[in-house]
Amino acid sequence: MAIPVLTRPAVLPKGVSPRTFSRAIREFTRIVGDRNVSVSSAELVPYAHDVIMIPPIWPSAVVRPGSVEEIQRVVRVANALRIPLWPLSTGKNIAYGRMMAVDGGNVILDLGRMNRILEINEPLAYAVVEPGVTYAQLYKHLRERNLPLWLDPPATAPGAGPLGNTVERGVGYTPYGEHFLFSCGMEIVLPDGRLLRTGSGALPGSRTWHIFKWGFGPYLDGLFTASNYGIVTKLGIWLMPEPPAYQPILMTFPNEDDIGAIMDFLRPLKITHLLPSAVVVAHALLALAAEADYPWHLTGGTRPVPEDWVRAEAAKRMLDTWNVAGCVYGSPAVVAEVAATVRRKVAAELPHARVLDLDEALQSPYWDHKVRNMTGVPSMIEYGRLSWRGGGNAFVAPVVPLYGAEAAKHMEIARPLFQKYGFDYIGEFIAASRDQHHVMMLLHKQPEEMDRARRCYRELTDAFCDQGYLPYRTNVAFMEHTMSRLDPVFQDVCMRIKEALDPNGILAPGKNGIRLPPPRRSGRTLTRRARRPASRKSRRPGGGRSR
């Protein structure tokens, strides 16, 4: 086996000498094989940048383990040599940072080789997957076996993985769209290399690991989502049994100020689960950005897109200012009755609404995509937004109470800030059971507009936080800033958990703003960790300890 010799890496981990780093690479290579360790700049390019508004953040290397045991060995080496690791599953976290770490010099731990579907339980409707399994792969697996089960893919990336998306607390569009809510049972490599199985999986030989979320004692799974406390290597996912019937409900609205009435109309339908899917209320420009050519001839790329152009292009595609997609599921009789009830309520309460004929709407790429989203079929049409104007895109995603006045207030906050920095407002409201996610896309030209896009993103984040609206996710450039907006006690608890589980701070430093706390003063010295408990042999009778 050829072991690469690295004498002058382009980017070293902070505080790590070239000699120590070369030793780490040799150790990693012995564990995973020379084909699965890369240090050359050419091979690190995909891990250094995304479409967000920051320059590349270069890692020092990428290591691709093929098993849980290899991850454990890599983690132990990293701990011994203080090498920071940035784990990722499929690396399709587009517009949030994709494969980028917060800090330069991290070793990317790419888990894409671990792509086995470990179990499909048809009667109990769940799957167990490794990190590298993609939505496209799982969908194909279910269809090839003609299993009457649906998965819940996100809108943008069939190549994304259900494990990674769930751990980042991503969302989808069927009744199972709150992905973490419909996960059950994790296997996690801890920062010291030990293996943790959560919930019922803590019992050796458990027969209920992926069907009963809570297990016995504290519920730990949430700690390992949107954090850097461990590496999730297996995940149970509940799948939706294929319903006997379903009926999409698609509507358009002509006026921007219709947003308040739309969300107030949806609130009782969502809280009662009469409309069980996530309901997307998308602005026209968001839909157009995925399939229409950007009108450079009208804007020169420096001015917002004219409103009359938006209306004309939307009309060609059965779109309008607001475009609403929801779905009803169940027996044919129930679906017919509920869909009819919703339509009667629309006619009585929403005079500006246009309810679309489904067969006609499916001729539109946008509406076909939305129906696929709501029926468990991966679709790629939203990738088109990445080429809308200059290749840059970053998601801004605050959460809003499910009231019409709150949605209108969000428009009042967002639109002037987009205009202030010379960008188009491109967004949607996604109604869940009691909240709505306001997902906005800051589409910018790279590299010339990145600085302006950063300032816009920061001001949007602060404006929403100032009004009590917290983003549920953010990109790697703003993770620490967003964490800084939170209560100091919350920040401290997050850091103390980090200190307890990862005292050397090797896993994803800075992820979601979580790092080791600063050293604490103890007497005349600074210490980061409390003293380890004495061994049983050194404990005195009666519970005392020898000194």
Image: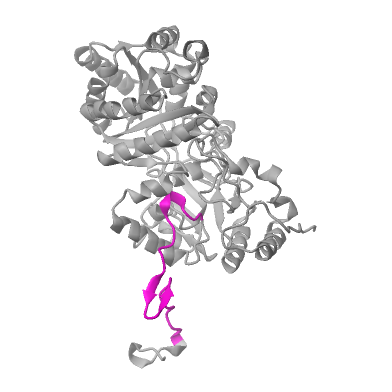
Counting from the top left corner in percent of width and height, residue 440 is at 39, 30
Quadrant for the N terminus, please: bottom right
Part of the protein shown in magenta: 508-536
Residue pictured at 28% horizontal, 53% vertical: 487
Task: Name above or below for residue 262 compared with residue 222.
Answer: above
Seen from this angle, which residue lies furthest right? Answer: 2
State yes or no: residue 10 in magenta: no
Residue pictured at 50% horizontal, 44% vertical: 164
Counting from the top left corner in percent of width and height, residue 539 is at 41, 88
Closer to the camera, 196 or 480?
A: 480
Label count reads 0
The answer to whether any part of residue 309 appears in the image is yes
Where residue 334 sits, quadrant-wise, is: top left
The answer to whether any part of residue 151 appears in the image is no
Closer to the camera, 219 or 408?
A: 408
Where residue 463 sits, quadrant-wise, is: top left
How is colour applied across the structure in the image? one colour
- Secondary structure that dominates the magenta span: loop
Quadrant for the C terminus, please: bottom left
Residue pictured at 60% horizontal, 44% vertical: 47
Counting from the top left corner in percent of width and height, residue 221 is at 40, 54
Closer to the camera, 540 or 412?
A: 412
State yes or no: residue 532 in magenta: yes
Task: Name above or below for residue 474 compared with residue 346.
Answer: below
Counting from the top left corner in percent of width and height, residue 86 is at 55, 52
Task: Name above or below for residue 33 compared with residue 180.
Answer: below
Closer to the camera, 65 or 506?
A: 506
Residue pictured at 32% horizontal, 25% vertical: 416
